[in-house]
Image (spheres, grey):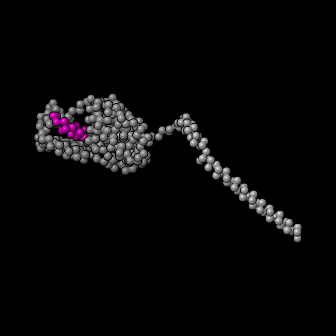
Amino acid sequence: MTDAWRKAGVFAAGILLGGALALWAYKMWTAPQDVAADAAVLAPTSIEAEPAAAASEAAAPPAPVMAAAVPAGCPADPLLARAGDADGQFSLQAALATNSGSDPSAFLKVAGDMAGQGRARDAEVAYIVACRVAAQASGSPSTPVADVQTQLAQHYAALANLPARAGQRPQLVERATSLLQEGVRTYSAALGANASKTQLASRRLDALNQPNETIISGPGAGLDATTLGAAAASAEAAAGVNPGASADCANARSASEKVVCTDEDIAELDRDLDRLRAQARAVTRDPGGFAQRQEQAWAKRESQCKGDKACLRSWYAQRKRELFSEF
């Protein structure tokens, strides 16, 4: 009996000792983590180590920055030289680095404004950024990219016909041709060969091979014709070229012709209309009818306006609408 109690006591003591050891082990396993966490927060060296780490990071060479891939169909770099002291203010790299949007319309608006101010290179940069933004948002090829491509092509083509840009005409025409070819392929695949955008881009592509034809946008191209008309006139002015009135002022006889040659506002309307008329003549599907309609419109101006400026402004606005219908 005594031996049995002795064994039971030893067994109980073993259980108690084992439990105590287990509890001690648990505390010792978890304690270092808690202590380490507290030490990291409270140790003075944790504050002193930060400048050293910062200095180490500053001393490390910067990681190489990978250049963004140029989307297919968008120019890699600007082609144009500055058109005057005010031009060349935009940086393609800076614009691409800071842009985070997905809508090219803002850049297209800037491009139109810059073209109207005669800042041809800045307009080109804005168009290129718009092309890349459209490609990033919609993929390339895509209709939004083709819309930008055709507008940039028109910008190049309009400048290619300026006397001041005669030396650069082959490069401008080459780039405009490439952009329009991309646009035609995209429109044809997405919209069909008979779609208005496809056919208009095709006619503009054909017109590039015709000398002395200025390509100006029409309805559906996303850019008002007066913008590129102003771009051409402003670029001429920036290059020191006096565009003058489109009329033959040396032989002006009628009252309306004399107003065109003497009033700068009317002369500007006449220049814009002359550029639009050249484009419409290049793409019309009815050349004979176009010439007849042109003669009728001129006769109407001579018979109705007789030099009245308000009448002439109204006539130019109406004639512009009529020319748009040729597209």
Predominant SS of the magenta segment: helix
| Percent of width and height locating residue 226 | 26, 41
In the image, taking residue 126 as reference, residue 252 lies left or right, namely left
In the depicted view, which residue is nearer to us: 293 or 70? Answer: 70
Choose top left, top right, bottom left or bottom right for residue 73.
top left
In the image, taking residue 67 as reference, residue 300 lies left or right, namely left
Identify which residue is drawn at 38% across, 40% down: 128
Identify which residue is drawn at 12% across, 44% down: 304
In the depicted view, which residue is nearer to us: 85 or 247? Answer: 85
Q: Is residue 271 magenta?
A: yes
Residue 184 appears in the rendering: no
Q: How many marks?
A: 0
| Percent of width and height locating residue 120 | 32, 35
Quarter of the picture holding the N terminus = bottom right
In the image, taking residue 163 as reference, residue 37 lies left or right, namely right
| Percent of width and height locating residue 211 | 29, 34
Q: Is residue 17 magenta?
A: no
In the image, taking residue 47 as reference, residue 107 lies left or right, namely left
Q: Is residue 16 above or below residue 286?
A: below
Q: Which residues are magenta?
A: 261-278
Identify which residue is drawn at 21% across, 32% down: 244
Residue 223 appears in the rendering: yes
In the depicted view, which residue is nearer to us: 231 or 251? Answer: 231
Choose top left, top right, bottom left or bottom right for residue 243.
top left
